[in-house]
Amino acid sequence: ATMESSPESPCGPPGAMTSDFHGLVDLPLECQRAIIDRLHWREVLALESTCSHLRDLVRGDEPAWRVRCEMRFTPEELAVAYDDATTWRERFMRSVKRGMKAVSNARPLLDLADNTVVHFRKFEEAQRRLA
């Protein structure tokens, strides 16, 4: 079966935008959340900047930010972000910034070429030597 657009398709032929186009914000809220939950955190932040509806939806979804925190960071990494962060999103962002700073500080000890992607756990030892 081919994936050609039929006359009943709300989006029309591939690449065409019509007045009947339905986007993410037109979906039921639970569908929007299900889609957002499957995005990489950087894509979630990009989506957050597209419109006020998606900004409010993303920023206000504390259970999703908690899951992102628990999946991405260890309890020890998150403990540093608990000090005065009031939301899981703030904890997530502070932990990301802390990790980015640690990568920058540890890079000379890791002897890596510029723009090499390094996961946080791979340079924990180097970070400890900096402390």
Image (cartoon, helix red, strand yellow):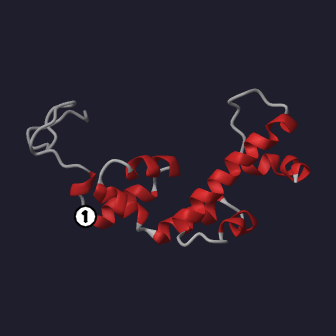
For residue 128, side relative to residue 113 (left or right): right
Q: Could you say whether the residue bearing mark 1 is in a helix, strand or loop?
A: loop
The residue that appears at 80% across and 31% down in the rendered structure is 112
Image quadrant where residue 52 sits: bottom left
**117 or 130: nearer the eye?**
130
Residue 131 makes an appearance in the image: yes
Q: Which residue in the structure is indicated by mark 1? A: 28
In x, y percent, where is residue 125? 87, 50
Q: Is residue 44 above or below residue 61?
A: above
The residue that appears at 72% across and 40% down in the rendered structure is 118
The residue that appears at 9% across and 42% down in the rendered structure is 19
For residue 20, side relative to residue 47 (left or right): left
Residue 33 makes an appearance in the image: no
The residue that appears at 33% across and 57% down in the rendered structure is 54
For residue 100, side relative to residue 24 (left or right): right
Specify the amino acid type for callout 1. Pro
In x, y percent, where is residue 78? 68, 66
Q: Is residue 89 above or below residue 23?
A: below
The crowding category of the residue bearing disc 1, from other C-alpha atoms within 10 Å (few below 14, some 14 to 19, many at least 20), is few
For residue 49, side relative to residue 67 (left or right): left
> The C terminus appears in which quarter of the rendering?
bottom right
In x, y percent, where is residue 1? 26, 35
